[in-house]
């Protein structure tokens, strides 16, 4: 009897100190957001200081410069085109490998703009209080945005999306016409996210999210089920990206390999049967 209660206390102790995956993720988000904000303040006088850290900038640069990465980013000043190209290939390659392994982990754990949108979603007083048009709720739209801006970059020989990038409004100095486009898109995105959640940008529109989404459909370590699903649909209700987790994946016996799964871990924590596992 005494042994049983000690055992129970031990088990209780383990549970008390259990580290929740959503908390580790929050810590990661705070670290990357802090790094980004620090870089913005430290390098603010350089208009495009932080763009080098954006994987989508490197992707656009390939299309814009058609192989010759003769870049305007000051961080690369003094480097030869060849060296910049090598840096870009390695840098982008790291994120592609990450996406092949873990899907859109970048979106859920690293991206500072995604973190800001998540905070806006969480504190918004108008969440679900205003109507968001059903016609705009299309996760496939972001793939068209991705394709469109890569084609535009190729035709214009410029990193075309940078003119409209809402993240740029926060993380880099905005000047001239970029100010108007970028700030306008930013305000529309923030207002829409406040009504309908971060999925407005991260699921329907973001070209970088679309790029990682392509890999997320085939990535190796998808969230999977290890037990019997009771079809309560709690996971679906907690998914910020509106993925039909139970119907499309768990009940079909498939891992969640979805172009929109940002590995936020909410489904894992919310499942009352605790059958969802990652990796
Ligand atoms: S979808 Fe875009 S903005 Fe959202 S987290 Fe991913 S990269 Fe960042
Ligand atoms: S499927 Fe799970 S981990 Fe993926 S976005 Fe939805 S709740 Fe988050
Ligand atoms: S929360 Fe768990 S038990 Fe409920 S539907 Fe989702 S996977 Fe099944």
Image (spheres, rainbow, N blue to C red):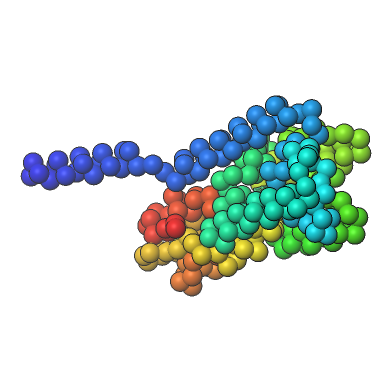
Measuring 32% from the left and 38% from the top, which residue is drawn there? 17
Taking 253 as reference, is 152 left or right?
A: right
Measuring 91% from the left and 35% from the top, which residue is drawn there? 176
Q: Quadrant of the C terminus?
A: bottom left
Taking 242 as reference, is 256 left or right?
A: left
The image shows residue 38 at horizontal and vertical percentages of: 65, 29
- Residue 143 or 159: which is nearer the viewer? 159
In the displayed structure, 48 sits above or below 133; it is above
The image shows residue 226 at horizontal and vertical percentages of: 38, 64
Marker count (numbered): 0
Taking 128 as reference, is 8 left or right?
A: left
Residue 165 falls in which quadrant of the image?
A: top right
Residue 205 falls in which quadrant of the image?
A: bottom right
Measuring 37% from the left and 57% from the top, which residue is drawn there? 273
The image shows residue 104 at horizontal and vertical percentages of: 59, 55
Residue 184 appears anywhere in the view:
no
Taking 147 as reference, is 96 left or right?
A: left
Q: Quadrant of the N terminus?
A: top left
In the displayed structure, 81 sits above or below 16; it is below
């Amino acid at each position: 009897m005494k042994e049983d209660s000690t055992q129970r206390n031990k088990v209780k102790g383990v549970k008390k100190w259990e580290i929740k995956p959503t908390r580790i993720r929050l810590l990661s988000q705070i670290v990357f957001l802090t790094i980004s904000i620090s870089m913005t303040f430290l390098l603010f006088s350089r208009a495009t200081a932080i763009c080098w850290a954006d994987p989508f900038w490197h992707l656009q640069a390939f299309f814009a410069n058609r192989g010759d990465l003769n870049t305007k980013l000051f961080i690369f000043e003094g480097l030869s085109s060849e060296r910049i190209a090598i840096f870009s290939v390695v840098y982008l390659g790291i994120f592609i490998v990450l996406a092949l392994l873990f899907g859109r982990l970048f979106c859920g754990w690293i991206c500072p703009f995604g973190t800001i949108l998540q905070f806006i979603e969480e504190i918004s007083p108008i969440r679900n209080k205003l109507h968001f048009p059903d016609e705009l709720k299309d996760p496939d739209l972001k793939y068209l945005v991705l394709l469109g801006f890569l084609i535009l970059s190729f035709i214009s020989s410029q990193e075309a999306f940078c003119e409209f990038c809402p993240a740029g409004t926060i993380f880099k100095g905005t000047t001239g016409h970029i100010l108007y486009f970028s700030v306008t898109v930013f305000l529309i995105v923030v207002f829409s996210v406040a009504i309908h959640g971060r999925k407005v940008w991260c699921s329907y529109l973001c070209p970088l999210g679309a790029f990682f989404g392509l890999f997320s459909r085939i990535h190796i370590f998808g969230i999977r089920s290890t037990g019997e699903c009771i079809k309560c649909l709690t996971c679906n209700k907690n998914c910020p990206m509106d993925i039909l987790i139970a119907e499309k994946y768990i009940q079909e016996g498939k891992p969640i390999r979805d172009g929109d799964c940002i590995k936020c871990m909410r489904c894992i924590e919310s499942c009352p049967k605790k059958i969802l596992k990652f990796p």
